[in-house]
Image: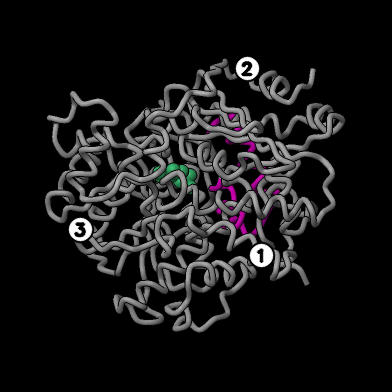
Amino acid sequence: MDLMYRSTRNEQNRVTASQAILKGLAEDGGLFVPEQIPKLELPLEKLGTMSYQETAYTVMSRFLTDYTEQELKTCINSAYDAKFDTSEIAPIREADGAYYLELFHGATIAFKDMALSILPYLMTTAAKKNHEDKEIVILTATSGDTGKAALAGFADVPGTKIIVFYPKNGVSAVQEKQMVTQKGANTCVIGIHGNFDDAQTGVKKLFGDVALGEVLARAGYRFSSANSINIGRLVPQIVYYVYAYGRLMKEGRIRPGDLINVVVPTGNFGNILAAYYAKCMGLPIARLVCASNENKVLYDFFQTGVYDRNREFILTSSPSMDILISSNLERLIYRMAGDDAKENARLMAELSSKGSYEINDSMKEAMRDFTGGFATMKDVTVEIAKLYEKTGYVLDTHTAVASCVYRTYKAQSGDHTPTVIASTASPYKFARSVMEAIDSKYAGMDDFELIDELSRISGTKVPRAIEEIRSAEVLHDEVIERTQMEAAVKEFLGIC
Ligand SMILES: *Cc1c(COP(=O)(O)O)cnc(C)c1O
């Protein structure tokens, strides 16, 4: 029997895994969730002997049950190959008593590659399985990293087109350059005057627009999503937590069955939700620490049970976490409400009308595995400089948020459980903030000088992803108002 997925806002809306991946978002605005979270069903000892690809098959085959073994293995082997600059795919680095799980060795040097290098394969396979005759149009809002990773994954994939919206002044120089130089006739990159929430809300609205869906269908297109609202993004993200546990066993850092903590720099709540799903599968995770930057809506939520987006949106040095509406929290809310779609839909309606909602006491109690923490831009600067001086290891600004939150948590709680910190981006992607944190003398240098200097002081090679954009030509320069998103989509697709 196949594991089915249902919408968090209507339990009658049930689909298979491949259908959920094709749709991206449910028609009722809800997110697809598995009806049960499958168990690992594997002796933990075994994890220490498995490659990344083998771990991926073990985890993903439990969730994506309507894919054949052959289909899934082809997807996995096509995704996790030489696009990554290490055969380990996600290596672990120990520094100052914490384990940094480096998720940035893929094509675009951010953790989004972990899922977006496989999503195009999962999606085109899903299209074939479901006899989809329409061309898939991937519609994506990005806070900086998803956009490039999705573009790299979908560029020139037959039967697909991809449109990316990013906040014009809300991403780093390297992030923007990576996106606007993207090649591929099926790609479209557009800046909007607004922030990430505006882009994400605009995209969700286009998804929910029935009339637009009909116009699209007549022209031979259907929308899907590469954002972490797509369950095809989340499932591949569970893999690296399971893999990390195996690596720590193999290196003799933990014994099978030992508990670990996980700290995740969080924006849309996708990455940490994947860690929670890993825990539900049976991976021995004790605490899940959710680290925020100054946009600390999640920290406040875990403190008080009130989610309140009515606050100033702050542009920080960790732009991929500059988010006030964390879409994937809905999947946790649904589960904490006892898989109650009505209650979840009520809370989400409050969020959209009032900008806030409060969960009840039993839901608060159910969330006790989570701890929230936050770090300011100043904290991040100090954390990067301190760890570099002490160990020579250079963190990016997002990982530094998590690293700082971890040290505060450890000091306050006295919890010395071995801890994995999700390292979500290469420092090269945020070279300016990183280098200025290490020494203010770098303030006068240009972006590529900083990159070469970072290579020198860290003793690491400049990643291919950076070399590629040094001299690349800008191919996308459109910037629009957020009210013009629908028109821009129609124009790119040639629909009037
Ligand atoms: C996307 C991103 C995050 C936030 O991840 P979520 O899954 O949205 O919580 C953190 N750091 C970096 C570098 C990212 O690209």
Kind of residue indicated by mark 3: Ala
Residue 318 percent location from the top left of the image: 35, 37
Q: Position of residue 169 (x, y in %)?
A: 42, 22
Task: Indicate the position of residue 156 as horizontal and vertical percent values.
Answer: 64, 40
Q: Observer-nearest residue: 61 or 197?
A: 61
The label shown at residue 483 is 2
Lower position in the chain sequence, tag 2 or tag 1 = 1
Q: Residue at x 74, y 40 (%)?
A: 136
Observer-nearest of 418 and 127: 127
Disc nearer the start of the sequence (3/2): 3
- Looking at the image, residue 297 sits to the left or right of residue 233; the answer is left
Gap in angstroms between the C-alphas marked 1 and 3: 43 Å
Q: Is mark 1 within 8 Å of ligand 1?
A: no
Q: Amino acid at mark 2?
A: Thr
Q: Which residues are magenta?
A: 328-355
Question: Pointer 1: what residue?
Answer: 72
Mark 3 beta carbon near ligand 1 (under 8 Å): no
Q: Which corner quadrant of the image does residue 449 belong to?
A: top left
Foreground tag (3 vs 2): 2
Quarter of the image with the C terminus in it: top right
